[in-house]
Amino acid sequence: MTRAVTILGATGSVGSSTLDLIERTPDAFEVVALTAHSDVAGLAAAARRTGARFAAIGDDRLGPALADALAGSGVETGAGESALIDAASMPADWTMAAIVGCAGLKPVMAALEQGRTLGLANKESLVSAGDLMMQAARGHGATLLPVDSEHNAIFQCLDHARLESVRRIILTASGGPFRTWSRAEMAAVTPERAVQHPNWSMGAKISIDSATMMNKGLELIEAHHLFPVGHGRIDILVHPQSVIHSMVEYVDGSTLAQLGTPDMRVPIAHALAWPERMVAPVETLDLVRIGSLSFEAPDPDRFPALALARAAVEAGGARPAILNAANEQAVAAFLARRIGFLDIAAIVAQVLDRYDPAAPANLDEVFVVDGEARRLADELMEVKAA
Ligand code: NAD
Ligand code: MG
């Protein structure tokens, strides 16, 4: 039986890894729709190779270029946000949510409303609108499979029917490229240096989040929604080798861990084939060569993003959406060399200080909060630059 698959964010790091797995087992999958933001050539090539039915480009000015690139291929095309939502709404057995940022939220909600299976990489959507997303998944009978490596590890180790038997979830973190650096050293880093992750090859935004450790903060909030054991029972542990992808400790003292080579194709393959298993072309985990695994506590002073995220999940309401939006804005400004590396968490903290609206009750209100947090972040960054 073939599985009909859609990939939202098909040209990115997670999207390409998903395509790689699908294209190696063409008999098992049939591609329904693919989307990208601006990479017309990459999207068109993937759509032709896989025989996708529909290709959507997010930037609506690029609609004609995509139509040209796919002329004669039989692939239908669309452009703009509505086309991304159309792509997500087409009947597919399995959808990969691999758009980066809150830009993925509406397509993710559209996919959940189909009541099928969603592989979730796009953590920002869950951070901003976790309650609404989980509600939509339940309401439409959709299955949400975590693709983020830590959450995929927890999903595999967790006794889902007996959450009360979980003592704690241990979310592992590599510590990023600046794990051992002082604040003074971090102050001067360039975007080129900050995107160089020691273990994983990823898109620019999540690479910067890993360097500030905001990624682990977003993942704490993500875990809180996916695995309702109470956020007080989710701990963060630095593990520089990124071999143990996370652990679940039970009340009887047993701790279960999922291990693997740091290659996103491992959790993607797990979610793609679930509840079965598929062959993935990944390096075998060679523990003799790795020799030893090490662990340390995260340093809240050098990585203030962790405490910001912890406070946001504790307070709930609009706080996680504000944290995420301010962070997206600040990371983009850092990548554009408009602010320094340490300014990222500082800007997020200032936006959280200045803005404390009521909890958003629906998706429109989430976008109001998101927009206002971005506006405030921009304003603060302009003051800084002036
Ligand atoms: P990426 O930057 O490599 O790719 C992002 C994809 O989203 C691209 O296809 C791009 O065209 C699309 N996109 C970007 N902006 C868009 C917009 N405004 N509208 C529509 N589409 C847009 O990112 P990535 O590293 O693949 O990460 C994707 C998501 O997966 C992120 O949420 C990230 O946190 C999460 N994730 C990534 C990894 C990883 O190893 N890369 C691991 C875990 C989780
Ligand atoms: Mg992760």
Image (cartoon, rainbow, N blue to C red):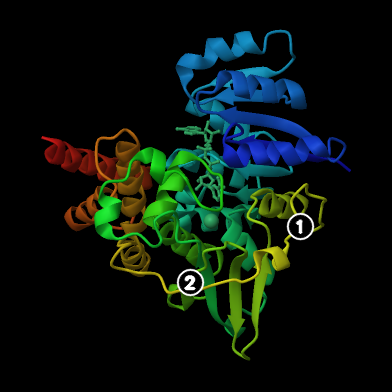
Q: Position of residue 195 (x, y in %)?
A: 44, 43
Observer-nearest of 264 and 151: 264
Q: Position of residue 349 (x, y in %)?
A: 24, 56
Which mark is on residue 299? none
Which mark is on residue 237? 2
Badge 2 density bin: few <14, some 14–19, many ≥20, Cα 10 Å = some
Q: Is residue 52 above or below residue 103?
A: above
Sequence-wise, the earlier of marks 2 and 1 is 2
Q: Which residue is mark 1?
A: 284
Measure the C-alpha gap from mark 2 to mark 1: 24 Å
Observer-nearest of 347 and 164: 347
Q: Element under label 2?
A: strand
Total number of numbered discs in the rendering: 2
Whether residue 29 appears in this view of the structure is no
Q: Is residue 175 above or below residue 360?
A: below
Marks 2, 1: nearer the viewer:
1
